[in-house]
Structures are given as C-alpha cells and as structure tokens.
Image: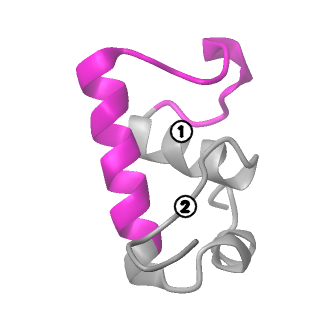
Amino acid sequence: MLYPSIDKLLNIVDSKYKLVHVASIRSKQMLENNHYQLKESDYINKRTIGRALEELEKGLIEVRFKGQK
C-alpha cells in the first residue's frame, strides 16, 4: 500500500499531472538543499519523492499556480 493515498492527494491538487509536478519540484529541493520540514523519524517514506508527497498531504506545502490567488 502506498502512503499517502493518491485519493487523499487529489483532494488537495486537482490533477495527477500537477501532483507529479509539485512533488518533483519539492523532491529536488530536498536533495539540493537538504531541507526537510519534518524530522527524519517522522517520515514514513525513505525516498524524497515520497517525503514530498507526505508534506503535501500534511499541508506543509501550499500549491499555487500562475493565475491563481
């Protein structure tokens, strides 16, 4: 079973494509800056892409696109 569930994430982001885009950007930030919003022990996933999805699900990432307020 994958965590977090894609159904939960699609309630936050309205499209799978946007979800992938947001998660990949955050994952790259984690790798480049070594900056995590949670303690290492609080993450369930080991990889940065999974950790980015966890942050999104917990509301630690605000998703805005051009043209949105």
- Pointer 2: what residue? 63
Q: Amino acid at mark 1?
A: Arg
Element under disc 2: loop
Residue 15 lies, in percent from the top left, at 50, 86
Task: Answer with the quarter of the image where residue 67 lies.
Answer: bottom left
Q: Residue at x 42, y 35 (%)?
A: 47
Q: Quadrant of the C terminus?
A: bottom right
Element under disc 1: helix
- Pointer 1: what residue? 51
Of pointers 2 and 1, the one earlier in the residue sequence: 1
Q: Residue at x 64, y 45 (%)?
A: 54
In the displayed structure, would residue 34 be above or below residue 60?
Answer: above
Q: Residue at x 68, y 57 (%)?
A: 4
Task: Answer with the quarter of the image where residue 27 lies.
Answer: top left
Residue 58 lies left or right of residue 48; in this view the side is: right
Q: Amino acid at mark 2?
A: Val
